[in-house]
Amino acid sequence: MINDFRYSGNIFLWDTETSSLLKSWEVCELPVRSCKFIARRSQFICASDDMRLRLYNYNTMEKVKDMEAHADYIRFVEIHPTLPYILSSSDDMSIKLWNWEQNWDCTSSFEGHAHYVMMCKFNPKDTNTFASASLDRTIKVWGLGAQQPHFSLEGHDRGVNCLDYYPGGDKPYLISGADDKTVKIWDYQTKACIQTLDGHSNNVCSVLFHPQLPVLVSASEDGTVRIWHAMTYRAETTLNYGLERAWSISAAKESNGLAIGYDEGTILIKLGHDAPVASLDTHISCHLQAGSQIRVTDLGIPERWCGHITMIFNLHH
């Protein structure tokens, strides 16, 4: 399933097997900036510009919780992989820790950034620590037991929008993307920037280490998604589907799929397939016609890390 949230204040739940809309929620009249599944509770939590966190049961569609969370826009929510914790980061320059087993009390507040906190991510190799990205141009690494950061990573020339931890056990790496149009790879043990990736022509909004494939992925306001080799850091592929700015990317742990959120909708692609996959569109004003086949040679993309559109999810306009 894909949870698709919009600046309209609505959330859509899609079946990725059939490209069908399962359910939708009208959350509020302001933008929804972040939404995450809590699969072990059959719920999702979303953050919106009315500075509130809302929790829904995605089976019954019931609103479970609605709470004022921050003093400014909430940029991101992050779910702890095992404990009953959720992190939220905000334009009020703070990160808050919420415990759903304690009636959703805010049990800690982490302060230390000097500008908006755009994202926070738990370290999969040490889930008692997390990192945050801020427009103050820093990445900070924190522990759940201390309200001050352990250390900062500095090197971006402009605000940092996004980050991700390397999922494997062999490298203590973290990736970040910023308004300086670059992607950086960091060793968070030595606190050194080991590589800078150039190529985007506008702000980098989302980055990830793919959980299945040896690639890094970055999305930008220049409308492109770039695929980089995770070992050599060579630029492998640039994807541009003409859907305006690319804001978010997500990958499932068990597949080679990649979901990309744009101004003009959300698409699901598969990386590394030799055979083309038919594209599907659920909206009449489609950018790629329903049923058309996109071949690697048509896009001018190297065969190895081609991106074949499998579905387009588009309900706005």
Image (cartoon, rainbow, N blue to C red):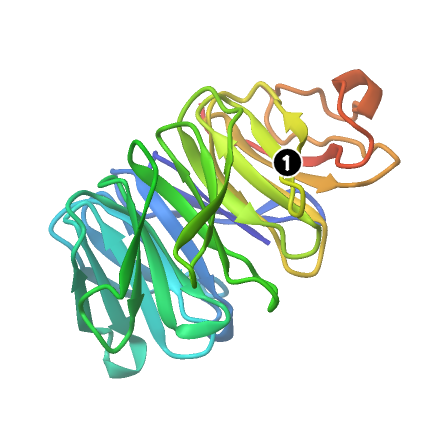
Q: In front: 32, or 283?
A: 32
Q: Position of residue 144 (x, y in %)?
A: 28, 74
Q: Is residue 45 visible?
A: no
How crowded is the residue under tag 1: few (<14 C-alpha within 10 Å), some, or many (20+)? many
Q: Is residue 301 above or below residue 56?
A: above
| In the depicted structure, whether residue 200 falls above or below residue 69 | above
Image quadrant in which you'd find residue 21: top right
Quadrant in the picture for the C terminus: top left
Residue lying at 39% horizontally and 56% vertically, measured from the top left: 191
Identify the residue at the far bottom of this view.
Answer: 101
Q: Is residue 102 left or right of residue 8?
A: left
Percent across and percent down for residue 261 are 51, 36
Towards the viewer: 114 or 33: 114
Q: Position of residue 30 (x, y in %)?
A: 25, 38
Question: Does any portion of residue 66 appear in the rendered image?
Answer: yes
Q: In which quadrant of the rendered image does the N terminus lie? A: bottom right
Q: Kindly identify the amino acid type of the residue bearing the numbered disc 1.
A: Ile
- Residue 126 appears in which quarter of the rendering? bottom left
* Residue projecting furthest to the right: 275
Dot 1 lies on which element? strand
Question: Who is closer to the viewer here, 183 or 188?
Answer: 188
User: What is the x, y in percent for residue 101?
Assistant: 30, 82
Q: Is residue 289 above or below residue 70?
A: above
Q: Is residue 22 left or right of residue 98?
A: right
Residue at x 18%, y 66% (from the top left corner) = 148
Above or below, 74 against 202 in this view is: below
In the picture, residue 5 is in which quadrant?
Answer: top left
Q: For the point 64% across and 60% down, which residue is it?
A: 253
Q: Which residue is mark 1?
A: 227
